[in-house]
Amino acid sequence: MTDAELDRLAEIIARALLERPAVADATGRAATWLPTPVRPAPPARGAEPPSWSGAAQDLGDVAPSRDRDWSPRFRAATADLTRATRAAAAGKGPPAERSARAPERRLTRQRPATAPSIDVRVGVSNRHVHLSEADARTLFGSAPLGVSRSLTQPGQFAATETVAVRGPKGTLESVRVVGPARTETQLEIALSDAAALGVAPPVAASGSLGDSIGGVALVGPAGRIELRRGVIVAARHLHLSPADSKRWGLRDGDRLDVRCGVGARAATLHDVLVRSGEGHATELHLDSDEARALGVTTGDSATVIAWRAAGPAKRPLITERDVVRLAREGARIPANAILTPSARDRASALGILDR
Ligand SMILES: [Zn+2]
């Protein structure tokens, strides 16, 4: 075949492609022979960058830590950073940590000096365990838990029963059981307790056991339980009665700055979580480490000085792929959406960007 013949053949093929009539695809839209440009799919394990990025490499070999179980507490995992960044970009994450240089003014409202002060009672929580009914039976047999004394939160009581908690490094004797039974066993300890046991639980809101850890055993007179999860350091929180919630305009999920203590150890605690609703009595719960550091004890008073409303506004993040999908479904792009630059281009090309 000569060069001239090759050119001629190329021309015939090109003309045939151009003249080929548009056919409707399954969605009813006219399809051309040109494939829709598609971005490479994100890695299957969504939270982690692809291995070729280098970011997912373990730094342990270049910066070895003597105690590998503990080191992650001081260095955020790459996957966590990626997750947090994506969530923040989509307006879904918790507010980013504020640097000391740029305090967050927009979301935190300082209470005016003339406003009546909000004083709350402090309740110090020592280490304790909530048990599921099955676990209570395993540890103590079938008799119901005995009531030692009732607690401030309605219906809750310190039981007469205690358990020993055994960790890899040490044991905590006589850890109080708090009743009534819950759906899942939860061990709440202070960070100093965690150090004594040799475990590193996360700080988490009571009942949020997604990140909780196990690795300790509960030992009672009738039996023993190896916990695979349920161990947390309880996040500081303010229980709020429905009446006080209404009176002060604070809602479940709000975050507060609360000034605690008097004298040299007085300090303001940030990010105090509001837990409100039926069955809550107003009381600021701190753990024994926090209380000792601030020099406060149960019955002391603390003052709410600033608050931040629950949850940032949720704005969906729309990618180019989402735009194609929405266009195919005949759906609109949500008015509050954040669009990536390529999504914006694609949306205006498809004529579905009305902003
Ligand atoms: Zn509490």
Image (cartoon, grey):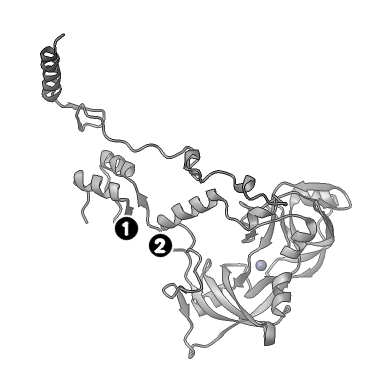
Please tell me the numbered disc located at residue 336.
Answer: 1
Q: Quadrant of the N terminus?
A: top left
Residue farthest to the front?
3
Using the image, determine if residue 10 lies above or below residue 227. Answer: above
Tag 1: amino acid: Asn
Q: Residue at the spot x=83%, y=51% of the render?
A: 139
Q: How many marks are shown on the rendered structure?
A: 2
324 and 149: which is toward the camera? 324
Q: Are marks 1 and 2 in contact (CB under 8 Å)?
A: yes
Can residue 316 be seen from the camera position used here? yes
Q: Position of residue 109 (x, y in %)?
A: 46, 78
Q: Residue at the spot x=88%, y=49% of the render?
A: 222
Using the image, determine if residue 344 lies above or below residue 154. Answer: above
Q: Position of residue 59 (x, y in %)?
A: 60, 47
Q: Is mark 2 within 8 Å of ligand 1?
A: no
Distance of label 1 from label 2 (alpha carbons): 10 Å
Tag 2: amino acid: Ala
Query: Which residue is tagged 2?
Result: 313
Q: 168 left or right of 336?
A: right
Mark 1 crowd level (few <14, some 14–19, many ≥20, 10 Å Cα): few
